[in-house]
Image (cartoon, rainbow, N blue to C red):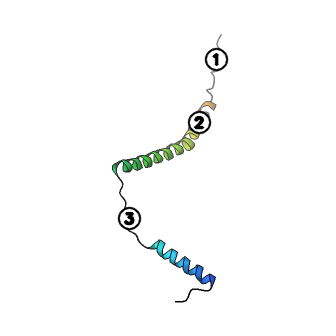
Amino acid sequence: MRPVENPRRRHALTLAVGVAITILPVTAQAYVGPGAGLTAIGTMVALLAALILAVVGFVWYPIKRLMRAGKASVKVPESTETRK
């Protein structure tokens, strides 16, 4: 077998071999223990709660302030009678 002389062919061959090795299925030797599993679940719940509170903070509170401002601007008409 002759060595590849063209540098472009050498790079293409290296890239092809690298991609082939990368996409080959490999058995996953993974185990998540109870401590790590509960930590992962707790992290996801905390992240979800933080996102929900961020939406509430950026959407609900400004709307609430606008509603209060609208109520405060409505004035009660004074009666025509004057007090002495």
Q: Residue at x 44, y 49 (%)?
A: 44
User: Mark 1: which secondary structure?
Assistant: loop
Task: Indicate the secondary structure of the residue bearing disc 3.
Answer: loop
Classify residue 42 as left or right of residue 62: left
To which quarter of the image does residue 63 belong?
A: top right
Q: Amino acid at mark 3?
A: Ala
Report crowding for label 3: few under 14, some 14 to 19, many 20 or more residues within 10 A (C-alpha): few
| Residue 56, position as x, y percentages in the image | 52, 43
Earlier in the chain: of badge 3 and badge 2, it is 3
Q: Are marks 2 and 1 in contact (CB under 8 Å)?
A: no
**Front residue of 81 and 20:** 20
| Disc ID at residue 65 | 2
Quadrant containing the C terminus is top right
Q: Earlier in the sequence, mark 2 or mark 1?
A: 2
2 vs 1, front mark: 2
- Residue labelled with disc 1: 81
Front-most of 39 and 27? 27
Q: Residues within 10 Å of mark 1 (few under 14, many from 20)?
A: few
* Residue sitting at x 37%, y 62%: 29
- Depth check, front residue: 83 or 76: 76
Say which of marks 3 and 1 sits in front.
3
Mark 3–mark 2 Cα distance, whole angstroms, equals 53 Å
Find the residue positioned furthest to the front. Answer: 2
Q: Secondary structure at mark 2?
A: helix
The residue type indicated by label 1 comes to Glu
